[in-house]
Image (tube, helix red, strand yellow):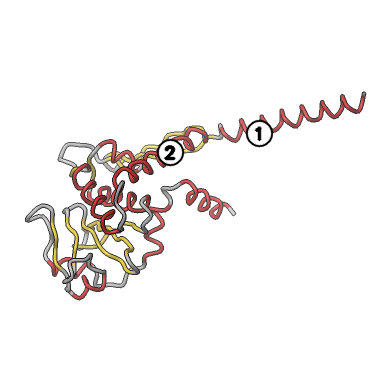
């Protein structure tokens, strides 16, 4: 009888300690950052709240992606649907509105963004739709950068200028590959006339070789499992 009582007490102690550790861990203070008009503010929140927000945004992005490509079978159809949705629903920020830099889902909620943010949303939705995609910044002048999205399609990369509502096709009217754009073997398709750059301007952006792996990491880190693995790797 005494042994049973001791074992029961030990179990209660272990459960209590586990509860205390879990409570401490979930309430561990972490930081979240938001940039508004170039000024970054930092807020301290409990770990469980940051995790819940992250998971909820992931669920919202998955649902959004599913709704956009619903009924589409081919990757090209999915890409066009995502491109059209993004250009129709994420508007150019007008002067006077604050430039807010936070999670991409917030851009969807606000309905407007800057050039890099619009491309960020497009590439992220593509990623949730099962395609490798990311956006990157290119130098168009000495102190000016411009964002373009790249999507891996049928063993090669293709390019989208979401800000200027522009994409590129080859002679067969398929999406032009990155090599075809470099050679000038492409046509510009713009949903809004007079908005795109010239062919030569687009060619010049890809004059230097691109390294895709590092740039694509930002998109994958918006997903919980990838972020978790990246965090473990960073810690250990």
Do residues under tags 1 and 2 come within 8 Å of each other at their CB atoms? no
Asked if residue 141 is positioned above or below residue 105 in the image, the reply reads below
Q: Position of residue 141 (x, y in %)?
A: 18, 62
Asked if residue 119 is positioned above or below residue 174 in the image, the reply reads above
Mark 1, mark 2: which one is toward the viewer?
A: 1
Residue at 61% across, 32% down: 24
Q: Position of residue 8 (x, y in %)?
A: 82, 27
Residue at 13% across, 61% down: 197
Q: Which mark is residue 32?
A: 2
Disc 1 from disc 2: Cα separation: 23 Å
Q: Nearer the viewer, residue 99 or 226?
A: 226
SS at badge 1: helix
Q: Position of residue 88 (x, y in %)?
A: 19, 44
Residue 137: quarter of image: bottom left
The C terminus lies in quadrant: bottom right
Residue at the spot of label 1: 21
Q: Residues within 10 Å of mark 2 (few under 14, many from 20)?
A: few
Q: Position of residue 81 (x, y in %)?
A: 24, 50
Residue at 31% across, 58% down: 75
SS at badge 2: strand
Asked if residue 175 is positioned above or below residue 183 in the image, the reply reads above
Residue at 31% across, 53% down: 123
Q: Nearer the viewer, residue 4 or 92?
A: 4
Q: Residues within 10 Å of mark 1 (few under 14, many from 20)?
A: few
Residue 60: quarter of image: top left
195 relative to 150 in the view: left or right: left
The N terminus lies in quadrant: top right
């Amino acid at each position: 009888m005494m042994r049973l009582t001791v074992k029961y007490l030990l179990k209660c102690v272990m459960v209590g300690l586990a509860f205390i550790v879990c409570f401490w861990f979930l309430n561990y203070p972490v930081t979240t950052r938001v940039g508004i008009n170039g000024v970054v503010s930092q807020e301290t929140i409990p770990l469980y709240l940051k995790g819940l927000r992250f998971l909820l945004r992931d669920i919202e992005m998955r649902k959004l992606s599913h709704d956009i490509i619903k009924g589409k079978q081919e990757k090209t159809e999915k890409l066009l649907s995502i491109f059209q949705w993004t250009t129709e629903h994420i508007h150019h920020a007008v002067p006077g509105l604050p430039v807010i830099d936070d999670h991409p889902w917030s851009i969807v909620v606000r309905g407007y963004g800057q050039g890099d943010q619009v491309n960020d949303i497009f590439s992220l939705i593509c990623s949730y739709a099962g395609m490798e995609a990311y956006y990157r910044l290119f130098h168009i002048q000495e102190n000016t950068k411009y964002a373009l999205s790249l999507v891996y399609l049928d063993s090669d990369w293709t390019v989208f200028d979401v800000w200027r509502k522009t994409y590129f096709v080859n002679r067969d009217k398929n999406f032009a590959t990155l090599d075809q754009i470099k050679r000038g073997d492409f046509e510009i398709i713009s949903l809004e006339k007079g908005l795109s750059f010239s062919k030569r301007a687009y060619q010049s952006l890809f004059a230097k070789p691109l390294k895709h792996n590092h740039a694509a990491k930002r998109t994958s880190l918006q997903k919980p499992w990838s972020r978790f693995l990246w965090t473990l790797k960073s810690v250990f």
